[in-house]
Amino acid sequence: MKQQQLSTERLTIYRGHKTILEELGVVIQGGEVVALLGANGAGKSTLLSILSGDSESLGIDEKSTILLNDEDLYALSKEQLAKKRAVLPQSSSLSFELSVLDILEMGLYPFSMLSSRQQNDLIAKAIHLADVAQFRSKSYLQLSGGEKQRVQFARVMVQLLAMRSLSDETLYFLLDEPTASLDPKYQQFLLQKLHQLCEEDIGVLVILHDVNLAAFYCDRLLLLADQKILCCAEPKDALTEDNLQQLYGVNGRAIEHPFYPEKCLVVWC
């Protein structure tokens, strides 16, 4: 039986002759949201790129293992990967005129086997789930940064819905700072949606800079410092004073959340 997880063993990454990440062991399983935390330049985006199947300009040590549901991730074609994992990058470089609907349809490019009716149904469902109906007929380039990010999230939702319609295996969603350009309402909205996706046997890895958003919404925190994994645990166990100091170089303390006692809240000293 296949082991349903996205995992690495002894993952070491090079850029030229420089070691970027060293001996990482990562496990992402369906039904959980894992936040990837670390200071600027810690290698978070590099790790997410490697796990998504994008190793351009990077070297992977020959002793490293990267498996997606027990298959060598780098033995899979781009089309195969697009049916097993979805990626929301930090930003889009789109510079030509397209409608929001055109953008959403991009989420269906690996799924030509679906009928037009099935494709339209998936787009309609993603528009509803991502709350972007008000942008549907607009030009993408005329949207604000936060609105563009919401549309990109909806595009990847289209892909995830199509993936799930064709497969019953564990799927994966990798996001690079998806809340950076969003206001508080839609930061919470997006992270709540990630938990809803987990109910469909989807494993989520999300890079966040806001420690308190991560502590509140994520099941585990993967802390990356000095090219290695410092800790991977539930928020209350991960966010110790020592770990916060090693992670960010500043003093912080996790206290009981004033409104949700089962959660923790980090205050910086």
Image (cartoon, grey):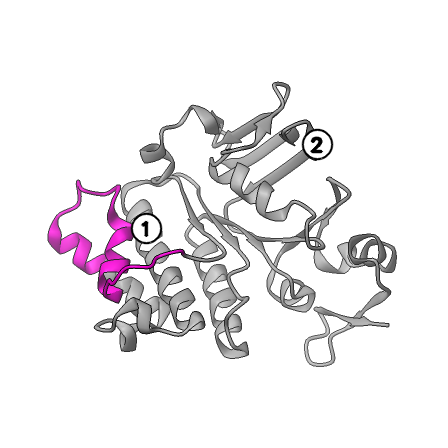
Q: Residue 88, how many percent across, how many down?
A: 44, 53
The circle on residue 19 is 2
User: Are there few (<14), some (14-19), or many (20+) residues within 10 Å of tag 2?
Assistant: some
For marks 2 and 1, give the CA distance.
34 Å
Kind of residue sitting beneath label 2:
Thr
Q: Residue 161, how many percent across, how many down?
A: 31, 53
Residue placed under numbered mark 1 in the picture: 159
Does any portion of residue 1 appear in the rendered image?
A: no
In the image, farthest residue toward the bottom: 259
Instruction: Find out whether residue 116 is within the magenta segment.
Output: yes
Q: Note whether 127 is above or below 52 in the view shown.
A: below
Instruction: Give the number of the mark in front: 2 or 1.
Output: 2
Query: Which element is circle 1 on?
Result: helix
Kind of residue sitting beneath label 1:
Gln
Of the 4 image quadrants, the one containing the C terminus is bottom right
Magenta stretch bounds? 93-122
Query: Which element is circle 2 on?
Result: strand
Q: Note whether 46 is above or below 182 in the view shown.
A: above
Residue ID at (23%, 43%):
111
Residue ID at (70%, 32%):
19
Instruction: Find out whether residue 188 is within the magenta segment.
Output: no
